[in-house]
Amino acid sequence: MSDTANPTIDSARQDQPTPVKSVKPRIQAGSLTPYMFVTPAIIVMLGGLLYPIFMAFYLSFYDWEIGRPFSDAPAVGMANFIRMIQDEQVWEVLWVTLRFGFWTITIEMVLGIALALLLEKPIRGASFFRTIFILPLMVSPVVVGLIWRYLFDARSGWINYYLTTWFGMEPLVWLGDPQLAFFAIVFTDIWQWTPFIFIIIIAGLQALPSEVVEASEIDGANWWQQIFLVKLPMIQSIIVIALLMRIIDVFRGLEVMLIMTGGGPGRSTELLSLHIYKRAFETQQLGYASAIAVLLILVVFGLSLAILNFANPMKTRSDV
Amino acid sequence: MKNETTRYIYYYTALILLACISLAPIWVMISTSFKDEVTVQSSTPLWFFFVPTFQNYADILTGRGKFDLYLMNSIIVGVSATFLTLFIGGFCAYALARARFVGRGFLANATLLVRMVPPAVVAVPAFAFVTLTGLDNDLAALVFLYTAISLPFAIWLLFGFYKQIPVELEEAAVVDGATPLQVFFRVLMPLMTSGYAVAAIFTFRIAWNEFILALLLTGRNTRTLPVATAGFLTEEGVEWGRIMAMGTLIVIPPLIFTFFAAKQIIAGMTAGAVKG
């Protein structure tokens, strides 16, 4: 597996070949001290992460609406899950989520990797440009939604202005048409997340041992062969992990769409997470929303396990 | 030689173009926040040349919208969650990095597994919990949840930084009679400043930017900035000048972090992607 520019990882990797460390740290097996150190974190994560996950499973077996006391909520067994399977809306938002994921991630990966390969050579001012590139990633999703809702606005939006004056097009009702709205949220996501792929891939490329690339050059590999037979295969695991992380994010995200379109028109921009949110707090069906949330948890955990399979930083040490 | 120059021209043109694409939407927001309503409504987009006004900021910070209160709420929540996460997460990461104990591997895996829990999953149970316990108008619930959400990434990040510190330092301190807590605070803390700085930026950013949980768990007096801004959008419709001023206020801290600690942020992001 190839490496990144991250010093933490480099050092962790160098530890690996040493099978046994002769020196022992202060806190060690048999002592209670390590447990005292990890207990606060465990308590907070149990309460703030595992309890909600457990509750989502639990509530999914009840028919509970906002405003009614939970003691009055009837237990309905698997009814919520059966309803989910037959629910056309759930299938519709799953399809929207998959299409959204396909277009955004494909374009972001291709653009991000291509730009990283083109701009890989270290040049003066590179760090300044990288600072600029990560700005979209630091902006709050709510603000991203606001900005692009303004830009895509049908009446006063800047995008319509340039399309009409430069290209002589008719003004488009971007966020009021199912297909155009879908395009708008895809476009927004690409703007925000392509830099993420770019930054990661370029870090991976720059950490490649230069001897390997040089050796391939001596062996007569041309530019394309170097990319597809040497560089990309060597950063393969980085690409896969970036891909998995983006897929997880597609299942987690809802804020940008909530601000830009509210999921509409119809359900054309309603991703799975947004659908759960609307089920729970707009149609007020907490139990049924929890059942869909269980589906979401299973998807995200499956993908997270896949990432752990590729790289588990805390398990690589021999002393574990 | 000529080839080299052409290549640099091509590099820099591409970089400048990409930088413009990244910056333009953010600049649209910032510039709009300094325009009066007439300028905002003007039929031509004005990028640079307009008479700037601070009226939007004066309106939102002193008006009836209680925006000053919400700004304070955001700061309180962000700072508290960051402090708690670093404190609790630092201990946990240290133990995971240095100690062998039963359950260590399980804890490490479980931590990484819950790192990506979707906010939509946490939302329903958290909402049910605060309405049942009457905590639905209290910033404490929000601070607790943000701490929980940030912990896995912070632990994982700090773990890497602890691994870099040579064990010999701690052993020397132990030989001199230091207790585990003294080792942690006196010996390691000074060496961990950059690690804690990166973790702090990521934690603060999560708490500062988060919207869904804040929307559900706060009331009239406990709203955070993103919630107040989104609320303004539906209530007031199209007062873009003021909305953009709110958006600009939300973006300021992350922008400052980026310019002062871009290198650390990139290290955190890259590490995050590469190592799960």
Image (cartoon, rainbow, N blue to C red):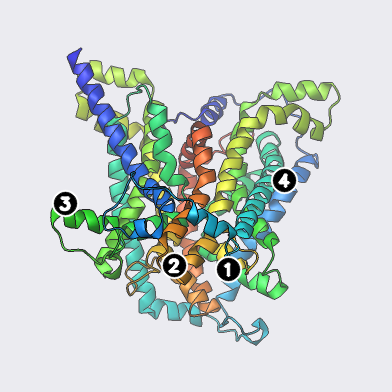
Q: Which of these two is toward me, A114 or A296?
A: A114
- Mark 4: which secondary structure? helix
The disc, 3 or 2, on the residue closer to the chain's N-terminal end is 3
Front: mark 3 or 4? 3
Residue position for label 1 = B216
Q: Which mark is residue A167?
A: none
Q: Which of these two is toward me, B68 or B207?
A: B68
The disc, 4 or 2, on the residue closer to the chain's N-terminal end is 4
Q: Amino acid at mark 1?
A: Leu
Front: mark 4 or 1? 1
Residue position for label 3 = A166
Q: Amino acid at mark 3?
A: Trp
Q: Amino acid at mark 2?
A: Leu
Label 1 environment density (alpha carbons within 10 Å; few <14, some 14–19, many ≥20): some
Do marks 3 and 4 share a subunit? yes
Residue position for label 4 = A38
- The x and y percentages for residue B208 are 57, 52
Give the residue displayed 36% in from the left and 38% down from the top: A198
Label 2 environment density (alpha carbons within 10 Å; few <14, some 14–19, many ≥20): many
Q: Real-space Cα distance between discs 4 and 1?
A: 30 Å
Do marks 3 and 2 share a subunit? yes
Mark 4 in CB contact with mark 2 (< 8 angstroms): no
Residue position for label 2 = A274
Q: Which of these two is toward me, B41 or A119?
A: B41
Lateral position of residue B154 relative to residue A174, left or right:
right
- The x and y percentages for residue A164 are 18, 57
Q: Real-space Cα distance between discs 3 and 1?
A: 43 Å
- The x and y percentages for residue B7 are 22, 22
- The x and y percentages for residue B191 are 67, 27
